[in-house]
Image (spheres, rainbow, N blue to C red):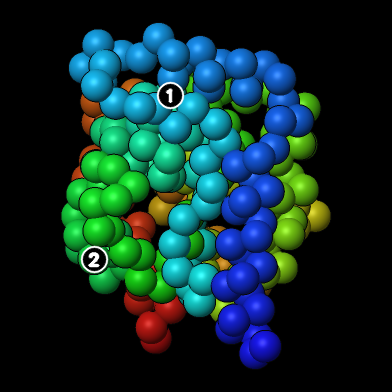
Amino acid sequence: MNCSNEGQSGLAALNQKIVACKRCPRLITHCEEVARVKRRAYLDWEYWGKPVPSFGDPEARLLIVGLAPGAHGANRTGRMFTGDKSGDFLYKALYRNGFASQPESRSADDGLVLKDAWITASAHCAPPDNKPVQDELMNCRRWFKRELKLLKNIKIVVTLGAIGHHSYLEVRGEKFTTFPFGHNLLHERLRPPIITSYHPSQQNTSTGRLTQEMLDEVFARAAALIRS
């Protein structure tokens, strides 16, 4: 088996383990309860309601690190950043910069393909109030460490939000104070370098703290660094 096939099969096996994980009872209970009750707009949906696997191109040179699945987004559809307003912002930016085959992500079977990009998260279960606690983040860290070893071609990392940034630095054994968080900050001393970005949460996008143009600029910068 060559390195490419080994990495692809390893990531697929890792995703299966993530989906089957039940290490955080509070999160599992929350995901299942949201899937049972549902949101009125999605009463006809069969919710995913369990840990959401990572998603993308196993040969990716771009790694995107988010926070956690949205209760009625990825926890409903089973795919990262799919089915909510956060995903609307993210996939438009990825599409415009050549990392996604289409600008929208509505369901896991909508035909979207990521090109040269891989999306993961600090926590793979939807947390109450979008706030995983430290023990839950630590439980997911085992998957994250393995994932980084399997992703052999990463040239640039985009961290979406302070928690995603912090999680990535901790896995790398780096200090938050050495590589601070802000919007569109580039930390070139790390290898691979990191670009930090505000998270495309509805709270950030509805208040104008993060605009579509601002997010597009982050991924344009990432694309330029990868392809230079």
Badge 2 local density, few (<14 within 10 Å), some, or many (20+)? some
Left or right of 136, for residue 215:
left
What SS does tag 1 mark?
loop
Split into 4 quadrants, where in the image is the C terminus?
A: bottom left
165 shown above or below 155: above
What SS does tag 2 mark?
loop
Residue 206 x/y as whole percent = 24, 25
Residue 117 x/y as whole percent = 43, 66
Q: Hey, what amino acid is under mark 1? A: Ala
Which of the two discs, 2 and 1, labels the residue nearer the N terminus? 1
Residue 223 shows up from this direction: yes
41 shown above or below 180: above
Query: Who's the residue at 66% across and 40% down the image?
Result: 20
Query: Who's the residue at 57% across and 72% down the image?
Result: 8
Q: Hey, what amino acid is under mark 2? A: Ser
- Tag shown at residue 101: 2
Q: Which of 211 and 143 is in front in this view?
A: 143
Q: Mark 1 points at which residue?
A: 71
